[in-house]
Amino acid sequence: IETWLPKADGQWSMVAVGSALAFNQQAIGTLAPSLRVTPHAEQTTTIYARVTSPTTPFYVRVMSRDDSAHFDSLIQLVVGSFIGISLILSLLSFMIYTMTRDRLWLFDVLFNLSGLSILLIQIGLASKLIWPSSTDWVNQLCLIANCFYPFATSLLHRQIFRLYALAPWLYWPNTLALLSFPVLLGLIVAGYGDVAMRINNATIFLLSCYGVVVAIKAQHADRLMLLGFRVSYFGFITSFIWWGLDYVYQLQTGSLVTLYPGFPASLFTMLMLLLIL
């Protein structure tokens, strides 16, 4: 993120922030990329910014220094809670897998850790705690983690679908998502991360739209379990359709939640698995 700030002499100064820079080079050590601005006391202060990112939407706020510190603390609190819940769910699923050898629970561990990895990288916690001196490495990991997420999701959902008497032909979109991951990985390695992300975002959006068919076609002898699956799965796909509109149609997001879709996705997936238990 390149920003141009006005100077007292009428000239402009450029300040760069974002994941393209090492975290220990940031002027302000907050998780979200931030910069200090001293507005003019009597006139409107104009700031120009150029954002370069494989994904179009970004979320910008102007706030006081105190509000910024409170916002950063709130992010760390929410992320810390999400990390704790994800690790507990992963451990629980792994314990169930060791007892039952049912691959569904092993794939759930992969799904939870995949979503957790995306969150840690995108929120900036990985840069702050693990790779404070890294630049391009964190960006590459972010691309790989985002493309791996639908792969892990498809592995898990294919196992869940088998419990609801879905015909095998209904799985083929998820199979395509599995097969697309090596292609996306190759694009990232070749330097076409922006192309990989566009394909990945479109895949997630289309799979979410197709999920309506899956929810309708699902069948189960236990009507309460079927209702619970449909409600939780509709919640899952609705959250990603809402998320995908900004990405696929290149709209500016007005919500911070849009940048971290793993929150609602993990919640609805947890509800689906609780029904199975």
Image (cartoon, rainbow, N blue to C red):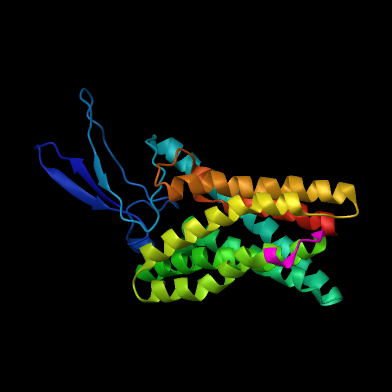
Q: Residue at x 22, y 29 (%)?
A: 40
x and y, in percent, of residue 246 in the image = 45, 45
Residue appearing at x 17%, y 47% in the figure: 13
Count all numbered tags in the image, as a single digit: 0
- Closer-to-camera residue (79/180): 180
Task: Please give left or right for residue 106 compared with residue 67 in the image.
Answer: right
Residue 134 appears in which quarter of the rendering?
A: bottom left
The magenta segment: 164-169
Q: Residue at x 10, y 41 (%)?
A: 11
The x and y percentages for residue 248 are 44, 50
Front in this rendered view, residue 66 or 181 = 181
Left or right: 66 in relation to 181: left
| Residue 182 visible in the shown view | yes
Report if residue 126 lies within the magenta region. Answer: no
Decide if residue 132 is in sight here.
no
Residue 206 quadrant? bottom right
Residue lying at the far right in this picture: please name it: 221
In the rendered image of this protein, does residue 13 appear above or below residue 46? Answer: below
Residue 99, given in percent of the width and then of the height, sits at: 86, 75
Q: Is residue 9 above or below residue 95?
A: above
Q: Which quadrant is the C terminus positioned in?
A: bottom right
Which corner quadrant of the image does residue 150 belong to?
bottom right
